Amino acid sequence: MPFIDNLNQQLGLMAWPLIICSVLTVMILTERLIQVLLCTGVGKTKVTALLARQNRHDEHALDNLTEELKQQRPLLYKGIAMLIAHRHFTKPLREDAAAIWLIQKRTELRSGLRLLSLIGVISPLLGLLGTVLGLIDMFTGISHSTGSVTPSDLADGLGLAMRTTAAGLIIALPAITGAQLLGLWADNVTAKLEHSLNRCNLWLEGMNVDAESGKTSACDTCEQNPAVNGTSS
C-alpha cells in the first residue's frame, strides 16, 4: 500500500509500533465515546419522577416496570430495574447487590482506559527511540561519506529523526487526554448511579427524599409508616 510505504519512509524503524499505537488509540476512544452516548441522557430528576408515579405495593405494575427498564439503554434505568427486581429482599441485601452491580459497571466504564494511558506513555518513548536511531543512521552515513557534508544531508537525517518524535507526541496527546477525561466521566457516572440507587432503595423502604430541600418523608402509601397505620407513640 502506498500509504504504508510512505509512513515507513517517513518514520523509519518506528513506523509499525507507532501505527499500532495510533490504531489502538482510535479504536479505544471510538468505543468509549459510543459508550458515553449510550449511558447518558437520563438524569436523577427523571428517575425521581418515575418512582413518584409508581405504587410500590402494586406488584404487577412493579414487575412490568422492571421489564420495561431492563430494555432501556441507560445504566441508570438498568440499576433501578435491578433494585426493584430484588425488592423482596431485605435492605442490607439490596445494598450489597447494588454495591456489586456498581463495581461491575465501574469496571466496564473504565475498560480500556489503562491501556489508553499506557499508550500515552509509550508513544513519546517510541518517538524518542526513533529519533535516536535516526541520528545514529545520519552520523553513520556522514562517517562513511568521503566528500563534504552538505546541509541537505543533515536535513534529511534530522527530518527523519524529528518526525518520529512528533508522531509519538501526536499519538500521546489524545491518548492521555482521552484517558483522563473518560476516567472523570466514569467516576461521575458511578457517583450519580450510586446516589440514584440509594434513593430507589429508600423508596422501596417507604421513604422519599426531597433532593432540593434535603428533607425526608415517609411514603403516604407505605403500610409500615407509623403515621399512617396509627402505631406512632
Image (spheres, helix red, strand yellow):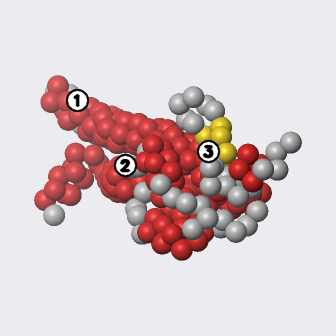
Q: Nearer the viewer, residue 86 or 109?
A: 86
Pointer 3: what residue?
A: 208
- Of the 4 image quadrants, the one containing the C terminus is top right
Residue pictured at 62% horizontal, 55% vertical = 221
Q: Circle 1: is it few (<14), some (14-19), or many (20+) Cα within 10 Å?
A: some
Residue to which mark 1 is pinned:
154
Q: Secondary structure at mark 3?
A: strand
Left or right: residue 49 compared with residue 13: right
Badge 2 element: loop
- From the viewer's perspective, is the residue at label 1 or at label 3 nearer? 3
Amino acid type of the residue that numbered disc 2 sits on in the rendered structure: Gly
Q: Amino acid at mark 1?
A: Leu
For marks 1 and 2, give the CA distance: 56 Å
As drawn, the label of residue 41 is: 2
- Across the whole image, how many numbered discs are drawn on residues? 3
Q: Can the viewer see residue 96 in this picture?
A: no
